[in-house]
Amino acid sequence: MLKGRNIGIDLLKIVSMVMIVTLHMLGHGRILESLPLMSHVYQTAWLLEILCYGAVNCYALVSGFLLAHCRANKLFELWLQVLFYSVIITVFMSLTFMRGTLPKEEWIYAFFPIVLQNNWYISAYFGMMCFIPFLNLGIEKIDKLFFQKILKGIFFMYILLPVIVKCLLRANINIDPITFIQGYSAIWLCVLYLFGAYIRKYVDYKNIGKKKSFLCFILMSALNFISKMIMEQTGHFPFANVLVDYTSPTVFIGSLALLLFFANVEINNIKLKNIIITLSNATLGVYLLHDNYMIRNTIVSRLFTYELHHAAYKTALLKLIVVVISVYLICSFIDLLRGKFFDIIKELITKVKNTNKE
C-alpha cells in the first residue's frame, strides 16, 4: 500500500479538497456577494478565494502525474459512486428539507447525474477518463521535444494569449477557441492531464525544491489578488476577474507549483501515512456530497444567512473555518462508510459467483 507511493500527492488531494470546500462555502454560501465592497473582510475573503482557486486544476494534474489508467471497471465504479450519492441524497431531501416540494423531474436527474451534468466537474472528469487511454498512448509514443512543443503551443495559444488579447481590448470578453469553457470542460481537464504527465515523465521535480514551488504559488496568488483589487478600486469591474479563472496563466502556474510542492513532500510516520491515504481515497466522496446541487441550493446557501443578514461579517469568516473543517470531516466519514458498504457488496457478489461456479 505504501511502497513506491508518493504520499505528498495524496496530501495534495486532501488539501485541494479542503480548498474546494472553502471555495464553495464562500461562493454558494453567498459570503462573497454579501460583503461590503473593498472592506477589510471583503479583501480577506477574496484573498482566501484566490488562494484556493487552483485547487480544482490540481485534481486533473494529479491524474496526469500518476498516469491514471482508465479501465471499464474503474469507469463503472466511478459511475456507481456518483449514482449512489445522487439517488441517496435525493431520497434524503425528499424526506426532509424538500418533503412534499420535490419536483418529479428531480428523480430523473437523480438517476442520470453524469449525462444531465448535475455536477459539472464529475461530468467533465468522466469525459476525461474516457480519453485517458488515447492520451496515454500519445504520451508513450511521442518524444520529449515534441511533447514539450505541444505543451508550449497550448500554453501560449490557449492560456496566455487570451489574457493578452483581453488586456489589449480592455474587456473581459469570452475568448474560447477550443471550448475550455473557462475551465469547466473535459477538454481543459485533458490539457491539465497532459501537463501533469509531462512533469512526472520528464521533469526532475525532486530538484526543484519545496521552497521555490511554494513561493511561486504565493507569487501567482498575489498577482491574481492585486490585479483584482486594482481593477475594482479603479472602477474596472468587468475586468476584475480576468486572472481569477481556472484557465488564466497565473492560476494555471499556481496549480503547477502546488503539484511540484506536494510531489516533494515526504512523511516517514507510517500511521500518519495510512491516515493520509485513507482520507485521500475519500476526497471524491466529499465533493459529491457537499456540492450536490440540492444540498448546495437548500443547505449551503443558508449556512451563513444569519451572520450576513446582521452584518456580522467577521463572525461569518470565523464560522467559515469551522464549517469547512466540519463539512470535510463529516463527508469523509460518510464516504468511508460508503466504501465499506461497497466492499461488502463486492464480497457478496464474489461469493455468489464462486458458488455458481462450484
Image (cartoon, rainbow, N blue to C red):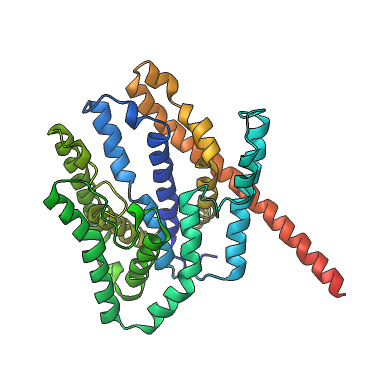
**Relative to 114, 145 lies left or right:** left
In this rendering, is residue 221 above or below 274? above
Given residues 192 and 342, the one toward you in this image is 192
In this rendering, is residue 5 above or below 118? below
Given residues 20 and 232, the one toward you in this image is 232
Given residues 355 and 249, the one toward you in this image is 249
Residue 13 in picture, x, y percent from top left: 44, 54
Quadrant (top left/top right/bottom left/bottom right) for the N terminus: bottom right
Residue 101 in picture, x, y percent from top left: 63, 29
Given residues 331 and 234, the one toward you in this image is 234
Count all numbered tags in the image, as a single digit.
0
Residue 250 in picture, x, y percent from top left: 23, 53
**Relative to 231, 108 lies left or right:** right
In this rendering, is residue 296 above or below 207? above
In this rendering, is residue 302 above or below 166? above
Q: Residue lying farthest right?
A: 358
**Relative to 104, 66 lies left or right:** left
Quadrant (top left/top right/bottom left/bottom right) for the C terminus: bottom right
Location of residue 91 by image quarter: top right
**Relative to 172, 302 lies left or right:** right
Q: Identify the residue shown where x is 63% and y is 56%.
A: 80
Q: Is residue 181 visible?
A: yes
Q: Residue lying farthest top?
A: 310
Q: Identify the residue shown where x is 69% and y is 51%.
A: 341
Q: Identify the residue shown where x is 57% and y is 71%.
A: 71
Residue 139 in picture, x, y percent from top left: 38, 78
Q: Is residue 68 visible?
A: no
